[in-house]
Amino acid sequence: MSPLNSTNIHPASFILIGIPGLESVQHWISIPFCCMYLLALLGNFIVLYVIKAEQSLREPMFFFLSMLSITDMILSTSALPKMLGIFWFNLREISFNACLVQMFFIHSFTAMESGFFLAMAFDRYVAICNPLRHSTILTNPTIAKIGIIVVCRGVIFFSPHVFLVKSLPYCQTNVISHTYCEFMALMKIACAERYTSKVYSLTVALMIAAFDLLSTAASYFFILWTVLSLPSKEASRKAFSTCSSHICVILVFYTTAIFTFLTHRFGHNVPPEVHITMANIYLLVPPTLNPIIYGVRTKKIRQRAVKVFYHIYQ
């Protein structure tokens, strides 16, 4: 514990200790984390490049996939460089303002990722359940408006977190038992009443997660209903193949997100090393797997990516 002067409400900096209980092996843990981070950057960059270069990919699904790739790159970059600095060089200190910025980016872009998953599910719903109106419903202006709404939602709902954290005093310690600045981790070290802040954070997180998850599930329920009623087995197989990649990445994202959310708020008996390791995986695995799954499952992206690498090695 690092004592602070009781008159100093906000410390100049916080100390991130990494993964409690695993300090001796953090340099080994950093290897797969670093590999996943580099793979996430490379994979999402390739997806963006392919979509930009290939005229046939100028479709709503791929526009939303581009937004998701940008979100993934920003989300993982918000946490991983600092995390690797802790693991490799013992750079544990982070300034108070930098901590707030990191917290805002992580929480807001997580909400944006969830929103883009919902947007992609809606696109698949329209394409399969109402294909004749797909091009008229999801026009370019509509796609842009959906993207703006998703971004604004993440910014508006999670901007108050910054002010809530800033309004609390930290007069006992500036040590955060985490690898990055997370809202609930900061709440734990505040030396004032935190009930209102916790309720707001919990309400916002549950509201966004419940709305996105239920809406996404409803979209795929109607998609499944429509697919099963198709007379052609080939059409059913193609529709299932198109949606399976979406379902895979959504399951990965929500499984890790829900586990992290529940253990941080209710899992008091979960060892901290388990929770924090899962919190790190939650920021890394979806951004790493999204381009891989979409690249493998989407024929147009796969073929164009193969062409790109073929020309590079010629």
Image (spheres, rainbow, N blue to C red):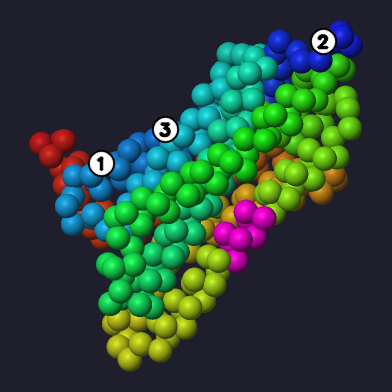
> Horizontal placement of 62 versus 27: left or right?
left
State yes or no: discs 3 and 1 in contact (Cβ < 8 Å): no
User: Which residue bears the numbered disc 2?
Assistant: 8
Residue 307, position as x, y percentages in the image: 16, 47
Mark 2 or mark 1: name the one nearer the start of the chain. 2
Q: Quadrant of the C terminus?
A: top left
Q: Give the label on residue 49, or none.
A: 1
Q: Secondary structure at mark 1?
A: helix
Mark 2 or mark 3: name the one nearer the start of the chain. 2
Depth order, front residue of 194/110: 194
Residue 173, compared with residue 206, is above or below; it is above
Residue 268, compared with residue 252, is above or below; it is above
Callout 2 environment at 10 Å: few (<14), some (14 to 19), or many (20+)?
few
User: Which residue bears the numbered disc 3?
Assistant: 38
Residue 37, position as x, y percentages in the image: 46, 34
Q: CA distance from mark 3 to mark 1?
A: 16 Å
